[in-house]
Image (cartoon, rainbow, N blue to C red):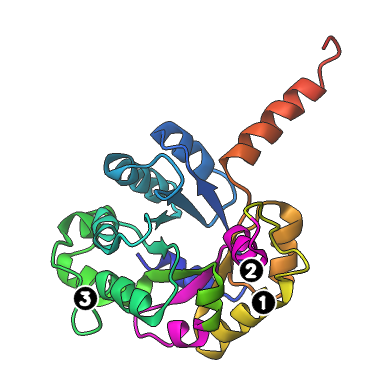
Amino acid sequence: MRRLLERLEAGTPLPFAWCGISDTRYIDMVAGYNFDAVLMDMQHGFFDEASVQNGISAVVAKGKSPLVRIPVGRWDMASRVMDFGALGVVAPMINSVADAQAFAGAMKYIPRGERSFGPRHAASVYGVSVPDYLEGIDAASLALAMIETREAVAAVEEIVAVDGIDGILIGPGDLSISVRQNRLPDAYGPDTIEIVKTIIAAAKASGKKATAFAGNPEDANMLATLGVDMISIGEDGSYIDKGIAMHIDRLNFV
């Protein structure tokens, strides 16, 4: 249950997979690669509650840490996927302190939050007793607030100061859309890269984790040099596209 926390405490950036395809066999295969964690995306991906539960079990069985991105504003879903055994939850579009407080409240047990009692399945996923789960999960799990709008950037210092928010996750595409007021994203482009640095600095100054989405290895390497703690490496489309392209490109008859 403490695997994600212990890996983060080692001080080196952790790579994690970003998945929208909900097939359990696919998740099992992805978790077999050199990722420390696998994120299952309920916001833009195809995960529902049943596939998240199955995916969490597949990820844990591979010795990796399961993360879930919930839909916008679904604080109830934050508690629910924690009950399924998630070790981290990403909440999109956290634009204010009120958003952060509602999210943190759903993630943490009393007295830090208001998460309802229902830990039996999650405790069984990690082979621990219910009292041990209750004692350790608030510290061992991550509530990650996505910072991806101008409003969120303006309030980022107050957002990361909220008790129960363990860190931020930079959404570079939507951040660039919001800053540039252009519906086509320009992740980590010239209009936002300095803003990205201020977001990372705000998280670090509050003793919170800085995490980010990277669509490619080049962005991931850049984020590592900026001190980001946990970095997604691509997503389903790139995993499948690059794999298929490699096979096709090596054929002599096509």
Q: Earlier in the sequence, mark 1 or mark 3?
A: 3
Image point (25%, 83%), residue name: 112
Between 111 and 100, the residue placed more toward the observer is 100
In the rendered view, does 233 fall on the left or right side of 38?
A: right
| Of the pair 94 and 60, the residue shown nearer to us | 94
The quadrant holding residue 242 is: top right
Is 247 above or below relative to 181? Answer: above
* Quadrant of the rendering where the N terminus is positioned: bottom left
Q: Earlier in the sequence, mark 2 or mark 3?
A: 3
**Residue at (22% x, 60% y) in the render:** 123
Coordinates of residue 216 in the picture (x, y in percent) = 70, 51
Q: How far from the left and from the top, in percent, is residue 115?
A: 20, 70
Q: Secondary structure at mark 2?
A: helix
Which residue is situated farthest in the top direction here? 253
Q: Report if residue 123 lies within the magenta region.
A: no
- Depth-wise, is mark 2 or mark 1 nearer the camera? 2
- Left or right: 15 in relation to 87: right
The residue that label 3 is drawn on is: 109
Dot 1, how many residues are within 10 Å of its Cα: few (below 14), some (14-19), or many (20+)?
some
Q: Which residue is mark 2?
A: 179
Mark sitting on residue 240: none
Outermost residue toward the left in this view? 117
The local secondary structure at tag 3 comes to loop
User: Magenta segment, which residues?
Assistant: 155-182
Q: Residue at x 19, y 54 (%)?
A: 121
Q: Nearer the viewer, mark 2 or mark 3?
A: 2
What is the C-alpha distance between the residues marked 1 and 3? 33 Å
The three-letter amino acid code for the residue at tag 1 is Ile
Q: Which residue is mark 1?
A: 195
x and y, in percent, of residue 180 in the image: 67, 65
